Image (cartoon, helix red, strand yellow):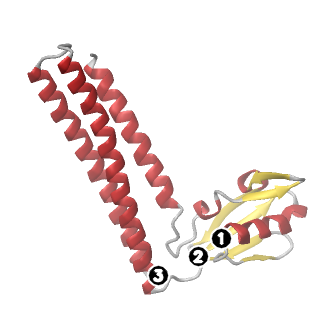
Amino acid sequence: MDENELISVLTKDMIKAVEAYKNELSRIRTGRASAALVDNVKVEYFGALSPLIRLATVSIPESRTIMINPYDISSLASIEKAIQKHDPSLNPSNNGKSITILIPQLTEERRKDINKQISKMLESMKQELRNIRRSANDKIKSAEKEKAIEEDKSFKLQKKVQEITDSYIEEITKITKAKEKDIMEI
């Protein structure tokens, strides 16, 4: 059993999980404009669904405004419909050349609901990291049973796996706290 490979695979898996979590968090509305709010919008363009970013530039001119400038003006109506379909709470306005989306202020109750949702996401992510840890520990225990590594080595490797897991759990907790603080800001 190659312990460096095991630690490398563990770290890569945890990095992927944390990146996916960050990506998921970036899509949650905070009351501020973010291009991530329209990242997943698919627009029907010439009979095929295309990602919005292929049809237009998305910019944030102000903290509560998303500006969408299509490469082809004839796609404006399709883009507007796709945004409304993707997130009915977003209200795009079309001026004939571009689309502007004003992000409304979140109510206190809505902010608290979003933070509850984020806390659930955090617990789910912690569980995912623990599952990755368990998989690594199972490999270590299996190698120990097969006498591929000694008991002391197994213990040290499991301790290292736990330290790595703890560091990633701490990282996602910090990321979550920052997002919660961002949401609660008025």
Give 71 or 140, whichever is nearer the viewer.
140
Going from the N terminus, do you reach mark 1 or mark 2 first? 2
Where, quadrant-wise, is the C terminus in this rendering? bottom left
Distance (Cα) linking label 1 and label 3:
16 Å
Q: Which residue is mark 3?
A: 110
Could you tell whether 2 is left or right of 147 in the image?
A: right
Q: Which residue is mark 2?
A: 64
Say which residue appears at 28% left-offset and 17% top-offset: 2
Q: Secondary structure at mark 1?
A: loop
The amino acid on which the numbered mark 2 sits, given as a three-letter code, is: Arg
Say which residue appears at 86% left-offset and 73% top-offset: 96
Going from the N terminus, do you reach mark 1 or mark 3 first? 1
Say which residue appears at 33% left-offset and 59% top-offset: 123
Q: Secondary structure at mark 2?
A: loop
Could you tell whether 125 is left or right of 94 in the image?
A: left
Could you tell whether 118 is left or right of 173 in the image?
A: right
Q: Which residue is mark 1?
A: 87
Where, quadrant-wise, is the N terminus in this rendering? top left
